[in-house]
Image: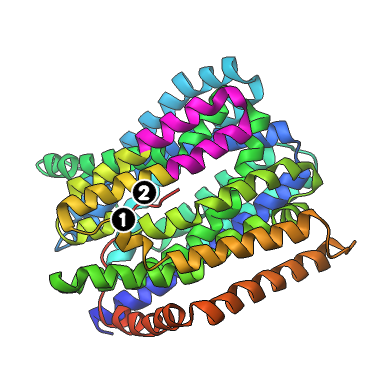
Amino acid sequence: MSLKAKSVTGAFFNLSANGFAQLINFAVYAIMARLLGVEEFGLVAICLMVVDFCNLFVTVGISQNLIQRDKWDDDFASLSFWILIGVSAAIAVLIFLLAVPIAYYSYSELAAQLIAALAIIPVSNGFRLVHKAKLEREFENKKLAAYDMAGVLVGGVVSIVTALVGFGAWAIIFGKVIQSVVSTALTCYKSSFSPSKVHDKRHLPEIIRFAKPLIAMSFVNFFSTRTSNIIIASFLGAATFAYASVAKQGFSVINNLTFQPLNRIALASLARVQENRLHLAFKRIVSLTALFVVPVYFGIGAVAHPFIDIVFGDKWVQSAYLLSILALIAPTQVMAYYLPNLLISRGYPQQAFTLNLINLVVNLIVPLIMVPWGLVAVIIGWVIANYITVVLKFAVVKKHMGIGIMSGLKPTWPFSLVGLIMFASVLSVERFRLLGLENVFIELAALVAIGAGIYSGLLLLFYRKPTLSALSELKGAQLKSAKVPSPPEAPSQP
């Protein structure tokens, strides 16, 4: 199989595994939300966020260097392995010395115990990453996808079973730890790499030099995408955080199942297009994205109440109101999602980093100002912050590449406008109970059908040309992506 064919096949299996993991995790998340109380569910969500942050220092930098090097060097890989073991062990120690006491005094003894148990995950990742890099270099993506899916399945079953027998918040922790351990064990067992004792440390400066900027970017991106979560957890408590977490979970899955496939198609075009056609290529990409992503965002917001009721249960009704508010970020997501990769594709990595800094600062300040007015105000502040950051980000891109906010607005506004009309219409039908249906499953199906009819009907009636143009672009972009290996993905946007 050619290198090009291996790249395309590997991308397919990575994408399939990610989609499978997202759906399984969402299903487990929904079941846990039904089985656990709001307070303990919120505590678990906060603990997982803390451990996700700690994982950044293990999962970013070193394995990427191993993958991009011209040749595999066992000495270099062994040094990388022992560095990761040392870093992961240090992270585990810091979790015990800092995170555990903070959780104990800020929340409860249970929170401290949960975070202590989750310290196993960074250590597990430290053992796995070099072996994973070896398999990725050998294009064994199918195997890696299977190992990831096995971990997700086993961990999900463990969480559900232990929750049903009464382990409460510990059920999710058991599942997450088992998921990590199973994936690591399978990856290490199947990898041909075996770490050896290292005597020569001449590669250490290269490893540190490569990892530092990637860790810095991931650090900023982590906080920029979770500022509202951190603010809610810090000022409004675990129970309030739980409602926000449930509301955002649906959008997290949507983001991974819609933007990531489109991102692979888009990046192939952006990386190879001629300079004088870059402006047009960007317009086509955001138009294509808006056509498919905007109705999903607005649609889930419009049917938030029956959706939350069916998936999570009626005790999470407050999350439904938050989900409807969060849907309003749809236009900002489609316009700004590709901007970091647009800059990187033309050799502006520092400016791409600046976009993350803008996210961090604005998404911190605006929701923080809204804290005195409660959870709904913080979520509204986060939505407002998304619109502010879009303007600021395009200002940076226009300065360096001549692509301003109108380049994002013109090709997407028809889909955003129609999506907003669909959102308001379906939400009104649902809120005023115009259908008069008692069965929530039938009501949800009817609302989805009404929304799909309104969205597609308005586009065909009033915006047929941009719609058909975007659809034709999809076919062309798919052909391009099959011919050209995709560059690395951009950091995920909130």
Disc 1 crowd, CA 10 A, few/some/many (<14, 14-19, 20+): some
Q: Is residue 365 found left or right of 314 in the rendered image? A: left
Of residues 478 and 196, the one nearer the viewer is 478
Q: Which residue is drawn at 30% across and 74% down?
A: 7
Of residues 307 and 326, the one nearer the viewer is 326
Which of the labelled discs sits on residue 390, or is there none? Answer: 2
- SS type, badge 1: helix
Instruction: Decide which of tag 1 and tag 2 comes sooner along the chain.
Output: 2
Dominant secondary structure (helix, strand or loop) of the stretch shown in magenta = helix
Point out the residue furthest to the top here: 105
In the figure, residue 479 lies in which quadrant? bottom left
- Looking at the rendered image, the quarter that the N terminus falls into is bottom left
Q: Can residue 23 be seen in the rendering of this structure?
A: no
Point out the residue furthest to the front here: 462
Of residues 429 and 485, the one nearer the viewer is 429
Do the numbered discs 1 and 2 sit on residues whose CB atoms are within 8 Å?
yes
Of residues 281 and 60, the one nearer the viewer is 281
For the magenta stretch, what is the residue range?
A: 360-386
* Residue topped by disc 1: 405
Which of the labelled discs sits on residue 165, or is there none? Answer: none
Q: What's the amino acid at mark 2?
A: Val
Q: In this view, does 94 lie above or below 83?
A: above
Q: Residue at x 54, y 24 (%)?
A: 234
Q: Residue at x 68, y 42 (%)?
A: 171
Q: Which residue is drawn at 56% across and 30% down?
A: 232
Q: What's the amino acid at mark 1?
A: Ile
